[in-house]
Every structure is written in C-alpha cells, then in structure tokens.
Image (tube, grey):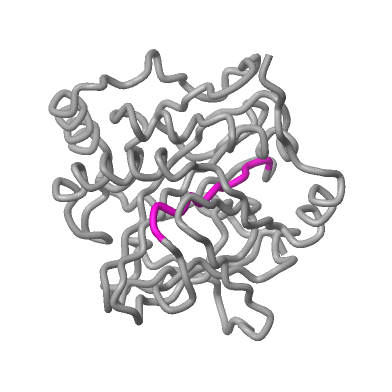
Amino acid sequence: MTRRTGLSPERQERYARTGYLFPFTVLTAAELAAYRSDYERLEPHLGDPPASPLHAQCHMHFRWAFELATRPSVLDLVEDLIGHDILVHTTTLFRKRPRDPAFVSWHQDDFYWGLDAPSLVSAWVALSDSTTENGCMRVLPGTHRRRLPHEERPNRDNMLRAGLQLSGEVDESEAVDFVLEAGQASLHHAQLVHGSRGNRSDRERIGFAIRYVSPAVHQQRPHHAVVLARGKDEHGNYELLERPPSPDFEQALAAHLAFWESRPARPADRPPAALAPEA
C-alpha cells in the first residue's frame, strides 16, 4: 500500500496563518515532459485569453488534464487542508507568452463562486518555470480571513474576463511572489487575495490551476459537473462527472468545444448578483 505524503503540523499551521504554502515538487521530469507535450498539442485550439474561455475546465474533457487534476501527489497535500473527501471544482490553464502584458487583478476566488464556507484550496502547478520576471502568481499573506468587497473594471489585458478586482487601493508592500520551478506547485486558500503581473521576460509562463472543494460546501452560483477525486460525496451539492474523459484527442476536443458552446454568455468570473461581500 502506498503511503500518503501529506503536510506536517507545522505546515498546516502556517497555511492557517498565512493562507498559502509553496513550493511542492509534484511532477517528475518525465511526467512534466509528458504533460507539457499534451498541453502543447492542445494549446493552438484554445484561442487567446481573456477573450476565449476554452482554457478553463480542460480536466472535464482531456484525459491528461483529468489525470493531472487527480494526481495523488497533489491530493495528499489538499487532504490535510479540506479533508479526505475531495472534489475537483474547476481548472484553468494560464499561459503568458514572452513579453505578454496579460495580468490577473487582485481578487479572491471565493467572491464570485458564493461558497457557504471557504473550504476550497487552489493548487497552481507550474508546467514551466514561474518567476517574478515572467509574471508568477503573487499573494497578500493573511488576507484569507474574510471576504472583501470587489468591483468590475474590464481591461483587455486582464485574464479575468469581467475585470473583477478588489475595491479601492491595494497595499502591495507585503506581497509574496510564488516563484516555482517547472514541476512544482503552490497551494492557496479560497479567500486569499492574489493576482499576477505581465510577463516582462523572453520566456513563456504556463501553469495549471486546480481548485479542490469539500463536498460539504454549498455554492450559490450554478455550477458544471465536478470530479470526485478522493473519498465520497454524501452531500449532493454538485453534479458529478459520470466518467473520465476520452483519451482520444479529437473526441475530447469536440466535447470541450461543445461544452463551451452550451454555456451561458455571462463571463465566468462575474459573481452572482445576490452575492454581497462580508464586512
């Protein structure tokens, strides 16, 4: 029986205090090369963010993305933060080309989903080196303790399509850069304020963000099917994906395109109208 490799009590305490942990090596060199190859085959079909939504929910349709989202090396870490029962809530591929001005505004993931409890952890898996120069993710430590007010400020370079961002000015003096080597991952809390700058380098930056949620969490906003990655779901708050996606690329691509053609036109990062920030 394979032994689970989780988080030490010290790391769990640090996560509770700061809202994040990094880095963790979750892919071998061979695994990284295989996933990069799969990504590079898919990438020409995805269009350019933020105009195209096709970079999201690839785990529902492509076998390699499904397998990456359900890797034991990542689930072992997540289990110590939200429990043994784990759902893959959403995924997004983030690519910044060399000298790409695309950025992510400061925001909290929990704001636009409307979760009744912030028992959701995001893992950001680096498929290339992620550095300060090429626009790595940045966080504001300790900002995960309450939901903050947001507003929409659309910007063509913002990778959040509706331009969702914190209201008012943001003090970046304590910001931490998540510098990762390819094959490493970071973890952050659903309410941790995070964002990223543009790519100032001649190297691309590629990451795969996976959000994991406890089945006990109820979501206000309607949601697509989720993947039961570990344990069991005794709550029924989400529809479960019936089967793993096909390993056939063309079949998977057709399913992915059909999925997005059937989705409502409302930008994916726009919160439900009834959701109000906590004071």
* Number of numbered discs visible in the structure rendering: 0
Q: Is residue 64 above or below residue 3?
A: below
Q: Report whether 57 appears left or right of 80.
A: left
Q: In which quarter of the image is residue 152?
A: bottom left
State the image coordinates of residue 236 (x, y, percent, origin top left): 57, 18
Q: Position of residue 219 (x, y in %)?
A: 56, 36
State the quadrant of the C terminus: bottom right
Magenta portion: prevailing SS class = strand
Which residue is at 61% across, 82% downward? 172
Tell which of 1 and 146 is nearer to you: 1
- Considering only vertical position in the picture, is 266 above or below 241? below
Q: Does the magenta stretch include residue 248?
A: no
Is 69 on the left or on the right of 245, as rendered?
A: right
Residue at 47% in and 71% down: 131
Where 57 sits versus 104, above or below? above
Image-quadrant location for residue 144: bottom right
The N terminus sits in image quarter: top right
Horizontal and vertical percent position of residue 174: 68, 80
Residue name at image x 82 percent, y 44 percent? 8
The residue at the far front in this view is 30
Q: What stretch is highlighted in magenta?
A: 119-128
- In the foreground, 22 or 226: 22
Q: Where is residue 182 in the image (x, y as percent from the top left)?
A: 45, 55
Residue at position x 71%, y 33% in the image: 5
